């Protein structure tokens, strides 16, 4: 049995110590806020891949993930004023902002879909072909937005149900149920035994 | 550990919860202690853990190298959010929220009652000076102010549209305005249309402002207009300003309730949040939809308690008392209460208000719509499928009682497809087809459904009706409607085996370099003709959307002509065009 759960980037990671790397990063942050393009590029190189990855998985497609990453870094110099280094490292903070932006984008896309009958979600609902054994990525892509979002936030981003409930404006119980349904669906999609 | 807990295995939902807990937390619960003695359940939890491990082990998607140059170019052009912008960007708001304390629990108010009552006097003071009490402008503009006159026109009236650019904005002699107008529901026509595209030209006057005119449809209710730099039939260009349109009925000084309800239900203030809320605050303060369109208050950190009298839960409770005492509630009010109940996560209350709406106003299209929402909510909460299926026939009853009027087909179609029998699915598909809104990507099920001749004929008849009644030069909305109609005709031709006709129809479904519906149909028609090279770019359009077209499916379709390098090149080319469109604001 798994004794403890490890996440690559838990939301509260990086709260310990101020090592050299952290002070370098702090300087980069200060320089970026002053408009230093080199510092901005260095921060982008260090943190954009993780932010893009989180957005890509949540949105389920590259164009939306690119938009999220673009929005995140376009406004970075201004938004860094809200970043408090004593509360954690920059990387996880940026990733959390990317997650929130991706969720906002998903909401607006969902809203647009209400008037667009040719939407991907509807198409997904009609996929009645026999399901072959899928990779985890493909299986995740076949979950509903609601299930996939909760699963990724919990299992990959490391949020607690309480935090997920707050972000998605649902109850904690609802978050737990969605995670349960997502796991159930994934087991079927991945061909696991029931 | 009792004998009972040893003998009974926890259900899967409990096992899922256990998988989220630490070892210590597990041992504190009866189900957790059961795990220590049950290999079967231990294995089940390990399998659930394995799903998380597999997800965390997924390769990171590769960051597109072109993204950084694009961001740097945008920053250089000054399109980044200026640091001193008066309104926070969504990102800044999020960043500040992340820096603040964690979100409050939903029912926090009950625990803080004492402290809040003590501070009531302060609350009144804060509320009185709060900006939300001041009237919001009719238009939210970024490059200038847009207005319409009269402010609340009568349906069918000719209105004036004005745009006053901000100092420093440089434009030509002409700007354009287009948008969508919601219409009052009328008895079923060939198509269940309840909105229409409108457009106007605005010409610069001597004082630097722009003016134009537009005649509203005779049954106009609400809508929105954008002022933009591109001609109206071009769907793109960044809007200079947005206007929420609300018509009046007998009193020209105020918007009609029908108009405000239509605007709220159709989300017409999406780009100008707060405009509609201000109208409700002023003209219908006790309407439930007021709290649907009112933006959520910003987190104030330590000052959160000032919102004690302003929570949606409290508004809902107050309005419920009020409306329960009124036997003459409007359909829009009852639908608003159900929507408000969903907002505060009270599905049972939502179901009760929906029942009242269905009982008292079955003839109103909102009854059918809210019943569909009720079934969708049951789906989201994983209600037993047969309990949802049992309510599907009530949709037919409401459809008959409201005179065959349909709105927002998307959710209805999904609910019926997920829970109805094959006869119900076909029946509603036909209704959707006759309403001119039957759209499905070719890669998902449409080919299967199009074996049904009646469905094909209905789709074709509706598409031809759209092409005969909507002029191509009206607005981008009209162009998109016509494009969809051509796509439908192409798809019907494809299903009938007339591949060359399908290609020709999809020639006509192209609006411009950014909007081209029916590229799925075109790809399959070209493949059927045997022109694999020509089909490649149209397949590549869907190449980066794994949920629609998996790489192995594309490979299978292209057969021996598949070349991985060429395939990726085609997808990159599509991506480049998409980026260019996005830069144009489309």
Image (cartoon, rainbow, N blue to C red):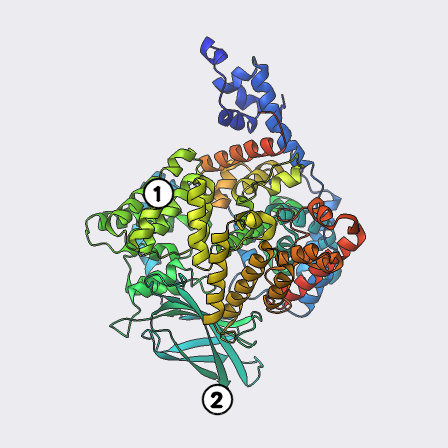
> Where on the picture, by quarter, is residue B47?
top right
Which residue is located at x 28 percent, y 75 percent?
A: B252
SS category of the residue bearing label 2: loop
Residue A20 spot, x, y in % from top left: 75, 45
> Can see residue A57?
yes
- Count of residue discs: 2
Residue at the image position 43 percent from the left and 43 percent from the top: B423
Is residue B86 something one can see in this rendering? Answer: no
- Look at the picture and state if B235 lies above or below A50: below
x and y, in percent, of residue B184 in the image: 33, 65
Instruction: Give the mark toward the camera: 1 or 2.
Output: 1
In the image, is B286 to the left or to the right of B517? left
- Checking the image for residue B393, the label placed there is 1
Report whether B309 appears left or right of B174.
Answer: left
Q: Secondary structure at mark 1?
A: helix
Residue at mark 2: chain: B
Q: Is residue B113 left or right of residue B507?
A: left
Observer-nearest residue: B38 or A101? B38
Residue situated furthest top in the rendering: B3
Q: Quadrant of the C terminus of chain B?
A: bottom right
- Of B253 and B426, which appears nearest the observer? B426
Numbered disc 1: what chain?
A: B
Q: Earlier in the sequence, mark 1 or mark 2?
A: 2
Q: Which residue is mark 2?
A: B207
C-alpha gap between disc 1 and disc 2: 61 Å
Residue density around tag 2, few if under 14, some if 14–19, many if 20 or more, within 10 Å: few
């Amino acid at each position: 049995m798994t004794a403890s759960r490890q996440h690559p980037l838990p939301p509260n990671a990086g709260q310990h110590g101020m090592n050299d790397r952290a002070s370098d990063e702090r300087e980069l942050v200060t320089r970026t806020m002053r408009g230093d393009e080199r510092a901005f590029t260095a921060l982008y190189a260090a943190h954009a891949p993780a932010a893009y990855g989180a957005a890509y998985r949540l949105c389920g497609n590259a164009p939306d993930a690119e938009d999220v990453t673009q929005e995140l870094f376009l406004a970075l110099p201004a938004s860094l004023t809200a970043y408090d280094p004593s509360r954690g490292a920059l990387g996880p903070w940026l990733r959390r902002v990317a997650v929130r932006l991706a969720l906002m984008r998903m909401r607006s896309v969902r809203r647009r879909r209400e008037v667009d009958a040719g939407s991907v979600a509807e198409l997904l609902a009609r996929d009645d072909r026999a399901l072959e054994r899928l990779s985890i990525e493909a299986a995740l892509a076949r979950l509903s937005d609601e299930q996939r979002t909760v699963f990724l936030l919990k299992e990959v981003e490391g949020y607690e149900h309480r935090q997920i409930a707050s972000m998605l404006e649902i109850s904690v119980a609802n978050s737990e149920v969605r995670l349960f349904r997502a796991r159930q669906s994934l087991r079927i999609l991945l061909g696991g035994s029931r | 550990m009792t004998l009972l807990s040893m003998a009974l295995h926890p259900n899967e939902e409990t096992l899922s919860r256990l998988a989220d807990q630490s070892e210590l937390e597990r041992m504190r619960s009866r189900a957790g202690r059961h795990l220590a003695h049950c290999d079967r359940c231990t294995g089940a939890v390990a399998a659930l853990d394995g799903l998380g491990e597999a997800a965390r082990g997924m390769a990171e998607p590769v960051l597109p190298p072109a993204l950084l140059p694009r961001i740097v170019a945008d920053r250089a052009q000054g399109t980044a959010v200026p640091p001193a912008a008066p309104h926070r960007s969504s990102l800044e708001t999020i960043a500040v929220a992340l820096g603040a304390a964690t979100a409050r629990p939903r029912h926090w108010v009950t625990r803080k009652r004492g402290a809040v009552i003590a501070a009531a006097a302060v609350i009144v003071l804060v509320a009185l000076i709060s900006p939300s009490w001041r009237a919001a402008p009719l238009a939210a503009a970024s490059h200038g102010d847009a207005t319409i006159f009269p402010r609340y026109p009568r349906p069918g009236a000719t209105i004036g549209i004005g745009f006053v650019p901000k100092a420093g904005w440089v434009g030509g002699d002409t700007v354009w305005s287009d948008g969508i107008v919601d219409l009052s529901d009328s008895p079923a026509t060939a198509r269940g249309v309840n909105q229409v595209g409108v457009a106007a030209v605005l010409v610069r006057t001597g004082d630097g402002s722009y003016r134009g005119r537009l005649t509203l449809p005779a049954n106009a209710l609400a809508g929105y207009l954008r002022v933009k730099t591109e001609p109206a039939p071009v769907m793109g260009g960044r809007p200079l300003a947005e206007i929420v349109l609300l018509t009046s009925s007998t009193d020209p000084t105020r918007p009609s309730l029908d108009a405000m309800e239509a605007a709220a239900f159709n989300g017409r203030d999406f780009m100008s949040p707060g405009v509609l809320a201000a109208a409700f605050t002023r003209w219908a303060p006790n309407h439930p939809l007021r709290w649907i369109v009112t933006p959520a208050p910003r987190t104030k950190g330590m000052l959160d308690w000032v919102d004690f009298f302003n929570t949606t839960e409290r508004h809902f409770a107050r309005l419920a008392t009020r409306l329960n005492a009124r036997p003459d509630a409007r359909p829009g009010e009852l639908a608003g209460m159900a929507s408000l109940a969903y907002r505060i996560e009270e599905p049972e209350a939502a179901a009760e208000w929906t029942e009242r709406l269905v009982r008292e106003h079955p003839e109103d299209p909102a009854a059918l719509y809210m019943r569909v929402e009720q079934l969708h909510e049951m789906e989201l909460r994983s209600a037993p499928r047969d309990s949802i299926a049992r309510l599907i026939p009530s949709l037919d009853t409401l459809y008959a009682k409201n005179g065959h009027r349909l709105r927002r087909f998307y959710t209805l179609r999904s609910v019926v497809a997920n829970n109805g029998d094959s006869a119900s699915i076909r029946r509603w598909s036909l209704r959707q087809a006759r309403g001119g809104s039957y759209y499905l990507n070719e890669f998902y099920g449409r080919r299967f459904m199009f074996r049904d001749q009646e469905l094909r004929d209905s789709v074709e008849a509706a598409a031809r009706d759209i092409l005969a009644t909507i002029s191509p030069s009206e607005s981008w909305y009209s162009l998109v409607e016509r494009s969809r109609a051509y796509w439908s005709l192409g798809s019907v031709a494809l299903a009938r085996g007339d591949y060359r006709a399908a290609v020709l129809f999809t020639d006509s479904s192209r609006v411009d370099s950014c909007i081209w519906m029916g590229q799925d149909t075109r790809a399959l028609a070209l493949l059927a003709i045997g022109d694999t090279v020509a089909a490649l770019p149209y397949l590549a359009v869907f190449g980066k959307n794994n949920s629609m077209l998996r790489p192995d499916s594309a490979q299978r379709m292209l057969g021996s002509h598949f070349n991985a390098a060429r395939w990726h090149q085609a997808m990159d080319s599509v991506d480049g065009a998409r980026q260019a469109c996005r830069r144009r604001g489309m």
